[in-house]
Image (cartoon, helix red, strand yellow):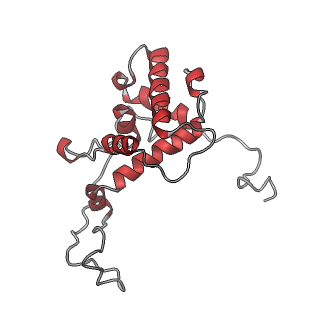
């Protein structure tokens, strides 16, 4: 799962000691059995969902590339994750049938983003000075930084050369005109 999380939120631009420990944060949540207050009827408990997904991802990697997911190239890993995102896994259909694959994808993305953006190092990236308590915010009117906030530092990040992240996505053809989803072609 470490390799999966590293593909979901790559931190190649960070030094090893400044990488946000996403998987340990998720693991701690699962160990403590903390949930968002609900669980979908077609989903097992979160701990079991992660076990099923880890098994299915490994089965897919071995079926397609005869190797563990962690040992695949970035492109191969991303192809497997893209298939999960698209709800069309290349292999491990029996394992994936044990839960709703779309809901697992949503759980995984939510957990990764929550773990990442709950960390103060991510706050630095987005210019969040941290919770106002106990000192409170003083400069709300003009959007000026608070005295304790660090100035923003911009940096450039380029996707790895062997990734599908920067490739244009093919959109399905819908005929002569585009309609907004959910409008039933009325607009």
Residue 86 in view here: no
Image quarter hosting the C terminus: bottom right
Q: Position of residue 111 (x, y in %)?
A: 43, 47
Q: Is residue 104 above or below residue 54?
A: below
Q: Residue at x 35, y 32 (%)?
A: 3
Q: Nearer the viewer, residue 166 or 65?
A: 65
What percent of the width, then of the height, locates residue 71?
Answer: 34, 22
Q: Residue at x 57, y 27 (%)?
A: 96
Q: Quadrant of the N terminus?
A: top left
Viewer-closest of 83 and 112: 112
Please give the name of the residue rendered at 43% of the width and 26% of the height, measured from the top-left corner.
76
Q: Residue at x 44, y 32 (%)?
A: 78
Question: Which residue is situated farthest in the front direction here?
Answer: 32
Left or right of residue 63: residue 153: left
Residue farthest top in this picture:
66
Q: Residue furthest bottom?
A: 141
Residue 5 visible: yes
- Residue 9 vs residue 174, the one in the foreground: 9
Q: Is residue 132 above or below residue 35?
A: below
Choose between 168 and 31: the one closer to the eye.
Answer: 31
**Residue 116 appears left or right of 64:** left
Q: As drawn, is 154 to the left or to the right of 69?
A: left
Quadrant of the image occupied by residue 86: top right
Residue 83: horizontal and vertical position, in percent?
54, 31
Q: Residue 119, percent across and down?
A: 29, 55
């Amino acid at each position: 799962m470490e390799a999966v999380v590293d593909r979901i939120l790559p931190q190649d631009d960070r030094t090893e000691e400044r990488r946000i420990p996403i998987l340990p944060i998720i693991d701690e949540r699962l160990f403590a059995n903390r949930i968002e207050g609900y669980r979908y009827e077609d989903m097992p408990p979160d701990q079991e969902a992660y076990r099923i997904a880890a098994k299915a991802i490994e089965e897919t990697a071995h079926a397609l590339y005869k190797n563990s997911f962690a040992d695949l190239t970035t492109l191969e890993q991303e192809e497997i994750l893209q298939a999960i995102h698209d709800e069309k896994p290349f292999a491990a259909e029996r394992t994936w049938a044990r839960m709703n694959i779309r809901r697992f994808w949503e759980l995984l993305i939510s957990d990764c983003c929550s773990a990442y953006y709950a960390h103060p190092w991510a706050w630095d990236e987005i210019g969040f000075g941290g919770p106002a308590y106990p000192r409170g915010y003083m400069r709300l009117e003009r959007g000026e930084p608070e005295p304790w906030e660090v100035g923003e530092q911009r940096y450039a990040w380029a996707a790895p050369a062997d990734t599908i992240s920067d490739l244009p996505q093919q959109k399905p053809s819908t005929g002569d005109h585009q309609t907004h989803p959910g409008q039933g072609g009325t607009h």
